[in-house]
Amino acid sequence: MKIIVSVKQVPDTSGKVAVNPDGTLDRASMQTITNPDDLNAVEAALKLKDETGCKVVVVTMGPPPAAGMLREIMARGADEGVLVSAREFGGSDTYATSQILAAAISRIGVEKDDIVMCGRQAIDGDTAQVGPQIAEKLHLPQVTYAADIQKTGDTITVKRMLEDGYMTIKVKTPCLLTCIKELNTPRYMSVGGIFEAYGKPLATFDYETLKNDPLIDPTTIGLKGSPTNILTSFTPPQKGAGMMLEGADKASCEKLAGILTAKHII
């Protein structure tokens, strides 16, 4: 059994967002971090590894420096890393990205007992589309918004978070799960893990490696093959300082009501 975890290196959105003239993010000018939800997927995979002794493979699509992120995740406990990187893949939207990642995961191999995991969504696009699209292209059953994961034999029991409650679903492996932050608390790297990470295998899949896969069509990958067009992207203005009213007496309540009335809230 192995678990393949798809992760993404994203811009640190706490800073200024830079945009290229073609509408894509200028990632080279921004600090990057590992997408937070993806770390929850990594932790879920590592917990199953602790329980079952399975292998955990992390895969990402990005420029060559994204290899450093994969090393960090291997320092947390993952066994192997795969970097999917080529100029032909640059500028891909969610549709094109899922095509490429599905081809990469297919090359890694998804066997009967395997699981593919993704974070719920990335903080740069917030679409929550890539994980489900990968599942569709690999013809895998999928369960999204996993808040708890239990494995018994070839059956995965997932507690799925909804807006108004929870849904429990049982699914057979192989399958794809998307994970939310409520699922767990990601572990940190250890000193020993950092040393071990640089002895673990890290493969690179470029265009030549994947071009023969049926999903890799030059007309549906990269910027030119992406059907989504970004009209504009910007950093939202910071909110002003809030107003604090202290006290629970009648005067405080009347003051609050007056402020809300003046703003036409009530």
Image: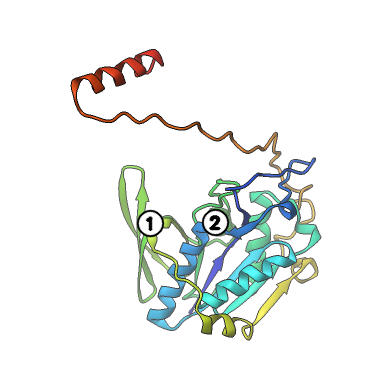
At 35% from the left and 31% from the top, the residue drawn is 244
Query: Mark 1 or mark 2, which is nearer to you?
Result: 1
Q: Nearer the viewer, residue 237 or 66?
A: 237
Which quadrant is the C terminus positioned in?
top left
At 51% from the left and 33% from the top, the residue drawn is 239
C-alpha distance separating marks 1 and 2:
18 Å
Q: Which residue is mark 1?
A: 182
Tell me which amino acid carries mark 1: Glu
Q: Position of residue 237 (x, y in %)?
A: 58, 33
On screen, residue 153 above or below 214: below
Tell me which amino acid carries mark 2: Gly
N-terminal of the two: label 1 or label 2?
A: 2
Residue 221 visible in the displayed image: no
Q: Position of residue 64 (x, y in %)?
A: 74, 67
Q: Position of residue 52 (x, y in %)?
A: 40, 81
Give the secondary structure at mark 2. helix
Label disc, if present, on residue 131 of the rendered structure: 2
Q: Residues within 10 Å of mark 2 (few under 14, many from 20)?
A: many
- Which quadrant of the figure has residue 65? bottom right
Q: Nearer the viewer, residue 246 or 36?
A: 246
Colour mode of the rendering: rainbow
Q: Position of residue 194 (x, y in %)?
A: 57, 80
On screen, residue 90 above or below 71: above
At 48% from the left and 79% from the top, the residue drawn is 1
Is mark 1 in CB contact (under 8 Å) with mark 2? no
Residue 222 visible in the displayed image: yes
Give the secondary structure at mark 1. helix
At 39% from the left and 74% from the top, the residue drawn is 154
